[in-house]
Structure formats: C-alpha cells, structure tokens
Image: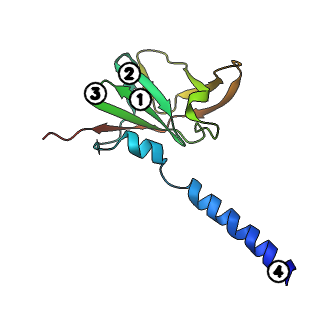
Amino acid sequence: MFRIILPLTLLTGCATTAETAQGPDPKLTVALEGRVAGKSQNCIRLDQATGNEIYRDAILYRTGRATYYVADAPGCGSSRGHNDYILVQNVFGSQLCKGDIVRQVERTGGFTAGACAIRGFTPYTKPKS
C-alpha cells in the first residue's frame, strides 16, 4: 500500500507546483493595480523609460506616472528574485522593439545569467476619472 501512496503523493505535489507557476506573477499584478491594458505595441521609446523590473515572464518598464509598459519576455523571469539581475539591452536607435534580445547580468558577479527575446509591449494606463 505504501508503494502506491508515496508515488501518488509525489505526483500530486508536482502538479500543484506546476499550477502555481502558471499565470501572471502576483507581484506584477500588484504593480499594475488600478491600470488598464491598452493595445499591444511593437516598440517603446527608451528615452521615456525611467526604470524597469523583472517579473516571471515579463519586464515592467515605467515611464513616469502615466504609462507602464509590460514586455512579454518568456525566459527572463528569475526564480531568485527580480532584484538579483541587471538588464542589458543592446539597442540600435532610441527604441526597444519586438524581437530585441535582453540579457540578464548578475548584480554581484557580473556574469550573464540568461537572455530572452521581447515578444511585444502592452501599455497600462490609469483610467481617467
């Protein structure tokens, strides 16, 4: 009986972990609270971006208080936390666009920890009262 229960218990634990990893990052949801998604865009102007944060499969670019842009970037997320990495963007011109590669560099050691391609940007704005 124990031979059957233990493997089933382990499989159930794996399924729960996989389900938890699916869906939007709860921290990103909190960061976008009170904002409404707009039409997806291919590029954003980097001269307007005042900061960025890495989430599970997305990068949040802040452009002041008005608009935030969420870059769909699977593979850029960090299991160690989004503050452990610095984003390095090799941009030719003034825009970051769909298809551009973003690298993650460890903050302490300077080693490249990974890279991903941007799939597009969704603007989020606060609705007018």
Q: Is residue 37 visible?
A: no
Q: Quadrant of residue 107?
A: top right
Dot 4 amino acid type:
Ile
Between marks 4 and 2 in the image, the one whose residue lies nearer the viewer: 4
Q: Residue furthest left?
A: 129
For the residues bearing labels 1 and 4, Cβ distance under 8 angstroms: no
Asked if 104 appears above or below 29 in the picture, the reply is: above
For the residues bearing labels 3 and 2, Cβ distance under 8 angstroms: no
Please tell me which of labels 4 and 2 falls first in the chain. 4
Question: 10 or 119, which lies in front?
Answer: 10
Dot 3: what SS?
loop
For the residues bearing labels 2 and 1, Cβ distance under 8 angstroms: yes
Q: Indicate which disc residue 80 carries.
A: none
Please name the residue that numbered disc 4 is placed on.
4
Between marks 3 and 2 in the image, the one whose residue lies nearer the viewer: 3
Q: Tag 3: Cα neighbours inside 10 Å, few (<14), some, or many (≥20)?
A: few
Please tell me which of labels 3 and 4 falls first in the chain. 4
Q: Tag 4: Cα neighbours inside 10 Å, few (<14), some, or many (≥20)?
A: few
Dot 2: what SS?
loop
| Coordinates of residue 96 in the picture (x, y in percent) | 44, 24
Please name the residue that numbered disc 3 is placed on.
65
- Measured in 3D between alpha carbons, the distance from the residue under mark 4 to the one under mark 2, in whole angstroms, is 55 Å
Q: Quadrant of residue 56?
A: top right
Dot 1 amino acid type:
Tyr
- Quarter of the image for the N terminus: give it: bottom right
Dot 2 amino acid type:
Ala
Residue at screen point 63% across, 59% down: 18
Residue 32 left/right relative to 109: left
Q: Indicate which disc residue 61 carries.
A: 1
- Measured in 3D between alpha carbons, the distance from the residue under mark 1 to the one under mark 4, in whole angstroms, is 49 Å
Q: Is residue 72 visible?
A: yes
Dot 4: what SS?
helix
